[in-house]
Amino acid sequence: MNNKFVELYQAKKKTPEELAMLVKSGSICACPTCIPMPQAIVKAIGDRARKGEIEGVQHHQLLTIAHADFFDPELKGKYDGISWFTSAAGRKGVQQGLYDYVPNHYSTVTTLWQKSMPRLDVFYTQVSPMDKHGYFSCGMTAAEVSTFMAMADIVLVEVNEHMPRVFGSHLIHISEVTGLCEFSAPLPELKNGEMTEKDLHIGHMIADLIPDGATLQLGIGGIPNAVGICLREKQDLGLHTEMFTDSMVDLLECGAVTNKKKPIHQGKTIATFAWGSQKMYDYVDDNPSFEMYPVDYVNSPYVISQHDNFISVNSCVEIDLFGQVCAESIGPVLFSGSGGQVDFVRGANLSKGGKGFIAMYSTAKNGTVSKIKPILTPGSVVTTGRNDVDYIATEHGVVQLKGKTAGERARLLISIADPKFRDELIHEAKKMNLMI
């Protein structure tokens, strides 16, 4: 390793507590999506806030996956989390009005930072160990890294020996780092729930509509994972996805995904972040066939549309008879965020032969509530508008809404609703003059 880089590393090496001293009252801080939150640095900042040394500090992150000091109600007004995609870690606080959030499409996050945010004082992140050329990798996320690096006055990195070294645009050179500390802990893993027969049934129906050679984006959850399982007999699939998941590793290892037919990044799997099991982390580590790029590139509908037969599979909370999809709230109560759903639906719509699937169970609450409704639950956020929606899938079938009249959409949606709710839905559709 170059002695110059080793000397820089040692000169910039501090304790988490020393790095936390660089955060001042009123600082705007941010870290990348999901895994790379720097645990020791965040805790040290929280400790300073707890002692009354700082106040008015903000932590911005999309998809926080572990509870941290910025979501501690005792630190309200001192160290506050701002959610860009509300997850379990901060959901209760957001719902109670303790913490704020930023509505967005994932592809626009970097633009929002560049054009709408006043500044970025501190960019902090967890990284892989430095390589012989002086570079750290942000490992499991590229999404906002380039933008944060360009904007931030202070760059703090937390070196974790367990963070994979991943190729792509999210490298940080030691010369760009203000200060660093070392921290060792296995990466948090995403535990997939048990896959149900219903998941597999929906997965098979969607997989039957996916041709060989298609390029895929699969969202999070049981149904997208089931689609992955049901695609194992396909040939020459490609991956250009927002989130890289375990089901995609299986498709690569069984040979269903080769990335050979992709018009760009041929032979490469492309993602903007990843979260899964240790098996997946081991797969991406130092793997030249896997690359991560900024979210404004990966999630760009224009970039997505360059892939013929692009297939997007996501999930939702409910849909109404007009075709409006809610994927982020239960009535007015925020549950998650838009994420990249609209980005990929629009990209698939623009792709030659592309298909955008939104999949869900037809009912909730043990079959007592239909998730296909005459109108969305009052206060629900419209995630994917009726003009963008393409295919809807439930355990009762798959229908295409794109290009259909309002009346045809209502009939098609009712046909995949749970049978016990269909008469009621027909009655309501007629009251709304959607069906004659």
Image (cartoon, rainbow, N blue to C red):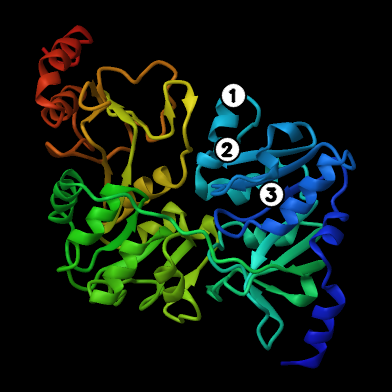
Q: Amino acid at mark 3?
A: Gln
Q: Nearer the viewer, residue 257 or 224?
A: 224
Q: Which residue is mark 3?
A: 114
Labels 1 and 2: the sequence-earlier one:
2
Percent of width and height locating residue 366: 23, 27
Percent of width and height locating residue 327: 39, 35
Looking at the rendered image, the disc whose residue lies closer to the viewer, 1 or 3, is 1
Q: Nearer the viewer, residue 241 or 8?
A: 8
Residue 136's place in the image compared with 188, above or below, is below
Q: Which mark is residue 90?
A: 2
Check the picture and name the quadrant holding the C terminus. Answer: top left
Q: Which image quarter: residue 148? A: bottom right
Q: Is residue 105 visible?
A: yes
Labels 1 and 3: the sequence-earlier one:
1
Left/right of residue 67 with respect to residue 272 in the rendered view: right
Q: Amino acid at mark 1?
A: Gln
From mark 1 to mark 3, how far is it between C-alphas?
29 Å
Percent of width and height locating residue 75: 75, 35
Residue 357's place in the image compared with 335, above or below, is below
Q: Secondary structure at mark 1?
A: loop
Q: Which residue is mark 1?
A: 96
Looking at the rendered image, the disc whose residue lies closer to the viewer, 3 or 2, is 2
